[in-house]
Image: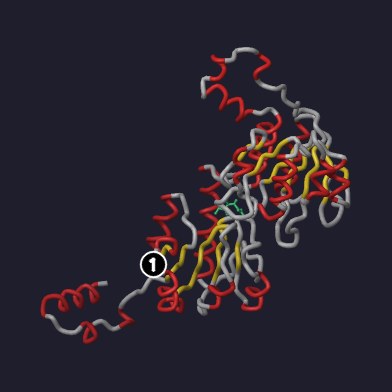
């Protein structure tokens, strides 16, 4: 440190070329980390910045030019579940030691390619389960009890103008609804636990029946929809694009509700919009969309749809736990260890 200080001092004051004095071996370069998505926890950002040279891809003026010039120096990437990282970008980062996903969805990362490269891809497994399940139940209750439409009615002063109880249509009871869960992983199980506390009979579908799940397994999604009052999507999107289509929505029927806290592309959004507009399903609670942040106008205008801006894990508690996992994964990988949360190595 002292030597570095003297070198810089001499360089500035005597105007000798730095190369004469600044031998790279004497300068402790911080490893470079590329952030593809902001981390919202200041304390974690401070620790990242203290240990690493952090480059925020989303703030770069010319991200492509920057990558061409500096890609080879990047040792770690942090990203969001929805953002992931493209194969093309991975190829521009030949010395990468870890992709730390600040989320549980790894559908936007080519895991097979990373496996082939021996590159650890980590996820924040278990950190967001409770919050995502909470929001799923919140969206379902909001959708079937028209909570947001009621809020808009009161805010707009319409209650005073039209105080008759018939001004707002009667809603649908949530307690006791037959809830069908699509994807019985951590989040699906947490949704089931919560819905069961409301007296809801639970059924589920997944790639296979699970021995440790006490609920009824239904192999076919159309059958599950037909036998449910509400479908809650908690599945990984890797191999399930567009599984909720017109046939599933028609099976759910005009009294049925759809909740999606997983990935927008599980749903054929055009089919969903048509089904809602035509009243072929009763309503929906949606946190995720096919082309975020763009949400189809028809969904935005529909009174029986409750919308969120991909917020299911967005609490201080969960995002702090997630960010800590990201930091730990980067630390482990750059210390030459296998990150404990690696899915690929
Ligand atoms: C996060 C997600 O909002 O876990 C995921 O896969 O999509 C979300 O929970 C996102 O990853 C935050 O960066």
Residue 252 picture location, percent across and down? 82, 41
The residue lying at 82 percent from left, 43 percent from top is 250
Instruction: State which quarter of the image contains the N terminus.
Output: bottom left
Residue 94 picture location, percent across and down? 52, 79
67 up-or-down from 191: above or below: below
Residue closest to the far left: 14
The residue lying at 39 percent from left, 65 percent from top is 60
Count of numbered badges drawn on the protein: 1
165 up-or-down from 134: above or below: above
Left or right of 161 in this view: 207: right
Instruction: State which quarter of the image contains the C terminus.
Output: bottom right
> Would you identify the image quadrant in which residue 73 lies?
bottom left
Residue closest to the far top: 164
Is the CB of mark 1 within 8 Å of ligand 1?
Answer: no
Between residue 141 and residue 33, name the one nearer to us: 141
Between residue 176 and residue 125, name the one nearer to us: 176
Scheme by which the image is coloured:
secondary structure
Between residue 103 and residue 110, name the one nearer to us: 110
> Would you identify the image quadrant in which residue 291 lies?
bottom right
Left or right of 247 in this view: 62: left
Residue 154 picture location, percent across and down? 55, 21
Residue closest to the far front: 278
- Residue beneath disc 1: 53
Dot 1 alpha-carbon crowd within 10 angstroms: few under 14, some 14 to 19, many 20 or more: some
Q: Secondary structure at mark 1?
A: strand
Residue closest to the far bottom: 20
Left or right of 317 in this view: 256: right
């Amino acid at each position: 440190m002292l030597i570095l200080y003297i070198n810089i001092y001499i360089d500035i004051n005597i105007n000798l070329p730095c190369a004469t004095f600044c031998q790279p071996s004497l300068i402790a370069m911080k490893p470079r980390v590329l952030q593809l998505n902001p981390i919202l926890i200041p304390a974690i950002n401070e620790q990242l910045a203290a240990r690493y040279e952090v480059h925020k891809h989303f703030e770069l003026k010319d991200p492509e030019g920057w990558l061409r010039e500096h890609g080879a120096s990047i040792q770690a990437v942090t990203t969001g579940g929805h953002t992931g990282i493209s194969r093309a970008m991975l190829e521009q980062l030949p010395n990468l030691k870890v992709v730390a996903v600040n989320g549980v969805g790894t559908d936007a990362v080519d895991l097979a390619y990373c496996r082939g490269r021996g590159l650890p891809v980590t996820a924040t497994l278990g950190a967001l389960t409770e919050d995502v399940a909470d929001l799923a139940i919140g969206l379902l209750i909001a959708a079937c009890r028209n909570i947001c439409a009621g809020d808009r009615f009161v805010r707009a002063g319409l209650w005073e103008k039209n105080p008759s109880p018939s001004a707002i249509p009667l809603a649908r009871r949530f307690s006791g609804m037959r809830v069908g869960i699509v994807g019985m992983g951590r989040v699906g199980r947490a949704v089931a636990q919560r819905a069961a506390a409301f007296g809801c009979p639970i059924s589920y579908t997944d790639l296979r029946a699970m021995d440790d799940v006490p609920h009824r397994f239904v192999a076919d999604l159309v059958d599950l929809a037909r036998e449910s009052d509400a479908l809650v999507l908690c599945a990984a999107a890797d191999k399930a694009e567009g599984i909720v289509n017109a046939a599933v929505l028609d099976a759910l029927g005009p009294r049925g509700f759809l909740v999606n806290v997983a990935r927008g592309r599980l749903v054929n959004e055009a089919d969903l919009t048509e089904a809602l507009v035509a009243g072929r399903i009763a309503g929906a609670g949606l946190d995720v969309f096919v082309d975020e942040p763009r949400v189809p106008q028809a969904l935005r205008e529909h009174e029986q749809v409750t919308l969120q801006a991909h917020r299911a894990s967005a609490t201080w508690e969960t995002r702090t736990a997630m960010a800590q996992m990201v930091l730990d994964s980067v630390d482990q990988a750059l210390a030459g260890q296998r990150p404990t949360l690696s899915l690929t190595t």
